[in-house]
Amino acid sequence: TQSILLKNRPKGKPALSDFEFVTDDSKISINQGELLLETTYVSVDPYLRGRMSDAKSYVPPFELNKPIHSGVIAKVITSKNDNFKEGDFVSGMLDWKTQQVSNGKDLLKIDASKAPLSAYLGILGMTGLTAYLGLTQIGKPVAGETLVVSGAAGAVGSVVGQIGKILGLTVIGIAGTDEKIDLLKTKFGFDAGINYNTSKDIKADLAKLAPNGVDVYFDNVGGPISDAVLFNINKFARMVICGAISVYNNTEIPKSVSVQPFLIKNSALMQGFIVSNYAEKFPEAMTKLSEWLAEDKLTYSETVVNGFDKIPNAFIGLFDGKNKGKMIVKI
Ligand code: NDP
């Protein structure tokens, strides 16, 4: 069995040296009620960066020299638990290990005949739920309005934009390469896109694309991109603060625009959230996402990296925009 431990708390952008690989050749045995799982897919997500630091947050930090864990799809190899049988696929928060023992608690059995297994880490998993619930519960989109999404070509952003289109909004995405902007428009049906790396003035470009102002802003990145959006919000705008990847690796407090005057003069709302706040709405969200997927109203992209030993690279790649759609590691 191979495991990946957190060796150091990253300073700035995570480095490969912050992770340690450990191999243990001893045979794993399981007790009554337990399962032996073999890892199939591992989700790497920007929020894991927060858990690698020891700053106080909504979840406790990862412990040093212990395996990191994240969303994982695994196959049941041996079962002494009545709820699972050999060959079942499950998803859950599991360790970065090639094999591990579980008591089955908090594992979700997944249906491999309904959707590809990896979809349960993305569009039918945490990032799909985040997109649907953040947009509908806080963004409260209304047909005819203008929605702007940052981190638009990523796992959450690409789904937010598509839901915006299903609900009848004009959707503008902000992402980091021309290839991604092209993907937004051709594959995900966005109306327009801004490449924040080549734009000379994001604020001015957005003013042209959204002449009536931005009604809903779904923010995945924070920092200067979000400042530029703030200058373009409409009266009664709703800003859904989902993520702030542009500042996760900061070592100093970033300078940013003071939001209060914008909120006051536009009677606007800005609200952060954690997807688990809406756990009671997960079944509703799953039903909607599955329906739209089956009806081909929703689609998704994945960037799949191969190999257990590539998990840290895939994770670090999120901060370099290496992914289109959900970043996943196939074991
Ligand atoms: P993504 O799939 O969007 O991957 C991260 C993307 O962020 C990269 O591909 C890159 O795209 C972009 N990015 C990286 N660095 C920067 C930067 N400095 N400025 C602007 N963009 C940058 O990740 P997810 O969809 O999984 O997550 C998106 C956001 O949502 C994250 O901030 C995450 O923490 C948050 N999140 C919050 C949840 C919640 O419950 N609140 C739940 C899930 C996610 P590009 O090439 O465009 O730069």
Image: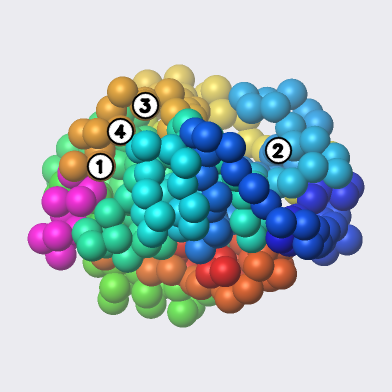
Frontmost residue, 195 versus 69: 69
Q: Position of residue 79 (x, y in %)?
A: 46, 47
Tell me if 127 is positioned left or right of 329 in this view: left
Magenta-drawn segment: 288-297
Residue 184 % position (x, y): 35, 68
Mark 4: amino acid: Phe
Q: CA distance from mark 2 to mark 3?
A: 21 Å
Find disc 4 in the rendering and name its residue: 282
In the rendered structure, the answer to whether residue 200 lies left or right of residue 127 reads right
Residue at x 31% of width, y 23% of height: 280
Q: Is residue 31 magenta?
A: no
Task: Please provide percent x and percent y for residue 218.
Answer: 41, 43
Q: Are discs 4 and 3 less than 8 Å apart at CB? A: yes
Q: Are marks 3 and 1 in contact (CB under 8 Å)?
A: no
Residue type at mark 2?
Arg
Q: Identify whether 200 is placed above or below 107.
A: below
- The span from disc 2 to disc 4 (Cα, nearest Å) is 23 Å
* Residue carrying label 3: 279
Residue at the spot 81% in from the left edge and 48% down from the top edge: 6
**Pointer 1 residue:** 286
Q: Is residue 1 positioned above or below 269 on the image?
A: below
Residue at position x 64%, y 27% from top? 59
The residue beneath circle 2 is: 51
Q: Is residue 77 above or below residue 259?
A: below
SS for dot 3? helix
